[in-house]
Image (spheres, rainbow, N blue to C red):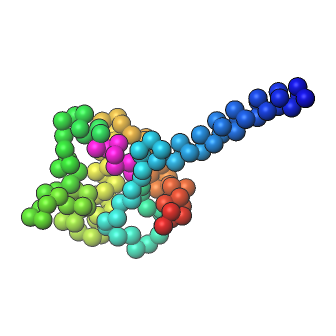
Amino acid sequence: MQEKNVRFRIILPCLLVLTLGLVLSSGEALGEERIPFTYPPFSAKKMPPVFFTHDQHIAYLDGKGQDCTTCHDMTDEGLAESFMNVRNIAPRKQMDYLHATCTECHVKLSKGPRLVDCRVCHCERIASEHAAKK
């Protein structure tokens, strides 16, 4: 009987830690829901779309005394949904513009992921998780 109690005392905490780790790894439990870049529309699916933690970006900007206009243009209709002025860039140059702008900010501020590989941002796992929720 004591052997069963010992196993139970070891296995149960391990299962709880594992479950908690799986829940927290999604990020959503910490308010880090990832949202996709939706513009420009992606025609060729060479890479998974980029999902980023909008709330983390907002919190960082708030801490620096900046606001939404750091990343979004103000238009006659209000705040643009698209990132910066990407809609004003020639369509064939929009991806290069987004790559350069995101990378420049992350490098300049030494914040966020190290952008040393395409798959840091273009993550198949995150894209699959997002698709499964739809």
Residue 116 seen in the figure: no
Q: Nearer the viewer, residue 74 or 5?
A: 5
Residue at image point 31% right, 44% down: 57
Which x, y percent locates residue 9? 76, 29
Which x, y percent locates residue 44? 44, 72
Which x, y percent locates residue 51? 42, 55
Residue sitting at the far front:
1
Q: Quarter-wise, where is residue 113 in the image?
A: top left
Residue at image point 26% right, 57% down: 83
| Image height of 98 relative to 19, above or below | below
**Residue 3 is a magenta residue:** no
Provide the residue span drawn in magenta: 52-58
Q: Quarter-wise, where is residue 91 in the image?
A: bottom left
Q: Quarter-wise, where is residue 107 in the image?
A: top left
On the picture, is 87 further left or further right than 21?
A: left
On the picture, is 61 further left or further right than 17?
A: left
On the picture, is 9 further left or further right than 43?
A: right
